[in-house]
Image (cartoon, helix red, strand yellow):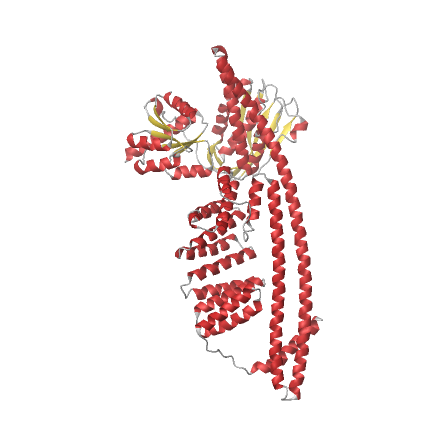
């Protein structure tokens, strides 16, 4: 059948070609108003999916515009042609036509039109799934032209599109930049639907960044639970917000709603294709009528012309028949494809539902475990506090205070472990490389665990292969975390015994070592049935000698940290016969020499013992003020207290201080704003941030506005003093040089 079809089509072309071969192409005289009327009719046909009629008028307008060199009309013609190609799925020709539209528009001053075409190109790249950079390039071209015209609405809607593009691709730094830029225009926008989309994008961004306070702030700004018409993609964003917050039922409902909209969209696409087919039929029928009129006029000329007309009509009928058959087959194919797509969507939704139920179960288990681990030491804190109030007997007070301190340290360890685990699982931790001394690192670990060693009367043995360079390259911080957890466990589960730390060379090259670390003990050992789960979150081995069993996160963190290095941890143990944890790490070699021992052990001068410092403490929490003031007065420092940023600014203007300790989150005026104001009239006084938040964004913001350092609460007293000393000395050194 196809062979007959192509033969007939070829015959049809051969037949009608001589009838037009002698016609000369001519361009009619036409006013600019008539030309724009053609454009208007072409755009109307296009909106009604009558693409063939639109293309016919666009081609007519293109010939006339080229003849009169009307660049403005040519630009608009090429946009119409581009949209027609895009509708038919020919993205290559669509891109080519949009590009020509831009080239012709560059000869005009119509910046609004250029912005529209660049937006067309951006939407086209989304259909093609090209790299994000190209899509964002086109969007920023829209921004460039909209900004030059101060078109606030276009700027706002385009930044919304950019933010959504980066959110879908998990490029959160660029998401924040786009949302921040868009916040400048939100008060100038009067269309609620666009503001709703802006609020949803902010809510999802801060949900992903674990900043629930800001996420809730933007959710509350959304006036209605209904998604605006034309913004159905917000169902997916709202579903992701519900999912991140654990509301899996609502997330599932929004996914179903989105699926329904997509199904309706597919139905509309189907209708569009039917309209395209009808338009094509109407165009062919229109041509047929023209030819019929022409044949009627020439009917009396010769019998030969009548024969040609008859053959032409037969060929056209055959052509239309085959066109109808092809259209029917295509419709059937698309219907089957639509059904298959819907079945795939249902399968994905079912899998999402199963995953949501599993996550809900894990979340409940996590909350239950953490609640138990928090309540146990909190019970001790509250109970011991009551005992101290009721029984001030000095003999028991020291014992109660020691137990209270133990419970507080346990709570801090649990919170730090949970945060550490969260950072690892969200890929916020990266392995870094810097020179360090392996022996010094292990000695410092031994020193920090001194009390643990003596508590159970254990001996501590260290062996470091003498062939290892004194200074190596690696991530000393992560290695310290691994060894402290493993050595701490060995000391805790061993009594009147031995703990060994052995470091040996497995492989050696000119640039690297492959080192094997072994942490052994001859303690209680780990039962066989526990060894397969010992590295799971909150997994614990019972130790009836200990008041608390530990957070149950240490070994889980160790396993994940070692995995960051591209390695694995191994366990050999038997109940009553001790344990051996081992792992291998690749570290870099360095040509640096070990510095003189005298220089190495030289301590930084403690200015606190020789200098009376005048320090301003800014904190809205009265208890924190008391604690900080007492720690500082032990060093005979003079302390001035302020409860918010406004008081701090006034105090800094009226007095001279050696150092300012500034809390970040305070009422009236926060520490960030207060520091910015102080830095306008005082560039030199060191300002150290006091905060319980350790996020990178907070640290970066504090440094950018002029803070010298940051201390995370609760802090180690020794580290606290050293941070103060370092910053005061640096400030004095700068003053002396100037």
Rendered residue at 67%/62% (across/down) = 331
Q: Position of residue 493 (x, y in %)?
A: 59, 22
- Along the viewing direction, whichever of 230 and 407 lies nearer the viewer: 230
Q: Position of residue 18 (x, y in %)?
A: 60, 82
- Residue 22 in which image quadrant: bottom right
Measured along the vertical axis of the image, is residue 68 above or below residue 631? below
Q: Position of residue 182 (x, y in %)?
A: 44, 48
Horizontal side of 737 relative to 259 (left or right) equals left
Measured along the vertical axis of the image, is residue 88 above or below residue 175? below
Rendered residue at 36%/35% (across/down) = 674
Rendered residue at 60%/52% (across/down) = 261
Q: Position of residue 324 (x, y in %)?
A: 68, 69
Horizontal side of 530 relative to 148 (left or right) equals right
Q: Is residue 519 visible?
A: no
Q: Is residue 175 visible?
A: yes
Task: Tell me the quadrant of the picture where the C terminus can be found.
Answer: top left
- Along the viewing direction, whichever of 385 and 731 lies nearer the viewer: 385
Q: Residue furthest right?
A: 1
- Along the viewing direction, whichever of 48 and 86 lies nearer the viewer: 48
- Residue 530 in which image quadrant: top right
Horizontal side of 622 relative to 614 (left or right) equals right
Rendered residue at 67%/73% (across/down) = 319
Q: How many marks?
A: 0
Task: Tell me the quadrant of the picture where the N terminus can be found.
Answer: bottom right
């Amino acid at each position: 059948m196809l062979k007959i079809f192509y033969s007939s089509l070829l015959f049809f072309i051969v037949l009608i070609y001589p009838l037009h071969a002698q016609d000369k192409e001519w361009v009619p005289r036409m006013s600019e108003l008539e030309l724009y009327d053609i454009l208007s009719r072409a755009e109307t046909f296009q909106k009604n999916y009558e693409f063939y009629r639109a293309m016919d008028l666009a081609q007519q307008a293109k010939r006339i515009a080229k003849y009169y060199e009307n660049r403005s009309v040519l630009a608009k013609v090429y946009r119409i042609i581009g949209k027609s190609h895009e509708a038919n799925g020919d993205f290559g020709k669509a891109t080519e036509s949009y590009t020509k539209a831009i080239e012709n528009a560059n000869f005009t001053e119509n910046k609004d039109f250029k912005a529209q075409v660049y937006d067309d190109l951006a939407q086209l790249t989304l259909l093609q799934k090209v790299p994000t950079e190209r899509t964002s390039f086109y969007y920023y071209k829209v921004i460039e032209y909209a900004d030059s015209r101060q078109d606030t609405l276009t700027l706002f809607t385009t930044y919304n599109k950019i933010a959504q593009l980066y959110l879908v691709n998990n490029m959160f730094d660029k998401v924040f930049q786009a949302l921040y830029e868009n916040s400048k225009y939100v008060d100038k926008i009067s269309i609620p639907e666009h503001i709703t989309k802006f609020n949803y994008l902010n809510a999802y961004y801060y949900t992903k960044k674990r900043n629930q306070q800001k996420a809730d702030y933007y959710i509350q700004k959304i006036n209605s639970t209904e998604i605006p018409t034309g913004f159905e993609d917000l169902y997916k964003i709202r579903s992701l917000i519900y999912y991140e917050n654990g509301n899996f039922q609502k997330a599932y409902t929004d996914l179903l709603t989105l699926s329904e909209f997509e199904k309706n969209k597919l139905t509309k696409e189907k209708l569009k294709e039917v309209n395209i087919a009808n338009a094509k039929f109407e165009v062919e029928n229109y041509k047929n009528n023209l030819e019929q009129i022409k044949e009627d006029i020439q009917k009396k000329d010769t019998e030969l012309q009548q024969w040609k007309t008859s053959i032409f009509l037969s060929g056209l009928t055959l052509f239309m028949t085959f066109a109808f058959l092809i259209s029917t087959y295509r419709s059937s194919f698309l219907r089957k494809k639509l059904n298959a797509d819907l079945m795939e969507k249902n399968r994905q939704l079912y899998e999402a539902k199963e995953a949501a139920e599993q996550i809900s179960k894990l979340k409940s288990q996590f909350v239950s475990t953490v609640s138990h681990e928090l309540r146990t030491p909190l019970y001790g804190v509250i109970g011991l506090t009551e005992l101290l109030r009721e029984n001030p007997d000095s003999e028991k007070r020291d014992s109660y205070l020691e137990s209270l301190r133990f419970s507080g340290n346990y709570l801090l360890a649990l919170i730090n472990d949970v945060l550490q685990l969260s950072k690892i699982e969200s890929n916020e931790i990266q392995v870094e490389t810097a020179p360090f001394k392996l022996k010094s690192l292990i000695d410092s670990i031994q020193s920090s665990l001194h009390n643990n060693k003596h508590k159970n009367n254990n001996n501590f043995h260290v062996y470091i292969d003498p062939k290892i360079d004194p200074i190596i390259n690696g991530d000393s911080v992560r290695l310290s975390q691994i060894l402290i957890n493993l050595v701490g466990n060995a000391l805790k589960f061993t009594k009147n015994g031995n703990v060994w730390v052995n470091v040996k060379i497995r492989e050696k090259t000119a640039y690297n070592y492959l080192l094997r670390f072994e942490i052994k003990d001859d303690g209680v050992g780990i039962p066989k049935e526990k060894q397969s789960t010992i590295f799971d979150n909150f997994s614990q081995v019972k130790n009836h000698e200990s008041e608390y069993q530990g957070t149950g996160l240490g070994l889980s963190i160790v396993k994940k940290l070692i995995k960051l290095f591209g390695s694995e941890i191994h366990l050999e143990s038997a109940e009553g016969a001790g344990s051996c944890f081992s792992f291998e790490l690749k570290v870099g070699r360095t040509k640096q020499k070990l510095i003189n021992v005298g220089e190495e052990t030289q301590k930084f001068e403690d200015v606190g013992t020789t200098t009376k410092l005048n320090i301003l403490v800014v904190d809205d929490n009265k208890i924190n003020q008391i604690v900080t003031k007492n720690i500082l007065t032990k060093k005979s420092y003079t302390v001035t207290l302020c409860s918010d940023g406004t008081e701090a600014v006034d105090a800094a203007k009226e007095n001279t201080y050696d150092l300012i300790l500034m809390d970040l989150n305070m009422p009236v005026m926060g520490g960030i704003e207060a520091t910015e104001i102080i830095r306008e009239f005082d560039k030199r006084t060191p300002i150290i941030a006091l905060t319980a938040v350790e996020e990178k964004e907070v640290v970066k913001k504090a440094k950018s506005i002029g803070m010298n350092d940051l201390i995370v609460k609760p802090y180690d007293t020794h580290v606290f003093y050293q941070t103060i000393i370092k910053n005061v000395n640096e400030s004095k050194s700068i003053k002396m040089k100037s």
